[in-house]
Image: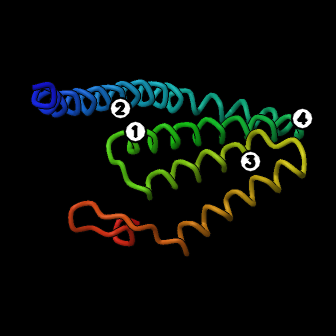
Amino acid sequence: MLTTIIKYFVPIVEKLAVLFLTLIALTLLVFSFGVFLKYIIHMPHLISHLQDILISNPSLAKKEIREIIAEFLLFALSAEVIILLVRHEPRVILDVLFIAISREVIVQVHSFVDMLLGVISIAILFFIRKYLRLKYKKGSKTYEEAM
């Protein structure tokens, strides 16, 4: 009796979970797109501001360029997370990790050790992607076709 009730509710719970994930992905997409549009609208002002800084103080321009790159990588990361929420594939997980580690290496690196650890992490991810073909099947696709 109890197993019959559980078997009845499992598909309903799975459908609700998928619906909830879709709602989260849609909310993240709308929010990210709105912030991205705001950023693009203000881009001419940022470029002129960056030109002024580059002329007056080149060392401060380096910091400003890093901040702009950090914002665009954050948009790319949010897009990859949205894809990860919708499609559950190993390739997407690796892509999210690539972007997240790359962003941290570019933006937050303060020492040689941090840079070295970031580069080693990215090299490990490349090794995983290239040489360790995980057994993955979704429908008729194998992991290699999903990559």
Mark before the other along the chain sequence, 2 or 4: 2
Separation of disc 1 and disc 4 at Cα? 38 Å
Q: Position of residue 122 (x, y in %)?
A: 67, 59
Residue type highlighted by circle 2: Ala
* Residue toward you, 75 or 96: 96
* Residue toward you, 118 or 71: 118
Mark 3: few, some, or many residues within 10 Å (few <14, many ≥20)?
A: some
Q: Which residue is mark 4?
A: 57
Q: Which residue is mark 1?
A: 82
Check disc 1 and report its element: helix, strand or loop: helix
Q: Choose top left, top right, bottom left or bottom right for residue 66.
A: top right
Q: Which residue is mark 3?
A: 105
Check disc 4 and report its element: helix, strand or loop: loop
Q: Tell us which disc is closer to us: 1 or 4.
A: 1
Check disc 3 and report its element: helix, strand or loop: helix
- Looking at the image, residue 128 sits to the left or right of residue 107; the answer is left
At 42% from the left edge and 24% from the top edge, which residue is drawn? 31
Q: Tell us which disc is closer to us: 2 or 4.
A: 2
Mark before the other along the chain sequence, 3 or 1: 1
Check disc 2 and report its element: helix, strand or loop: helix
Q: Position of residue 54 (x, y in %)?
A: 82, 39
Residue type highlighted by circle 4: Asn
Q: Which residue is mark 2?
A: 25
* Residue toward you, 93 or 135: 135
Residue type highlighted by circle 1: Ile
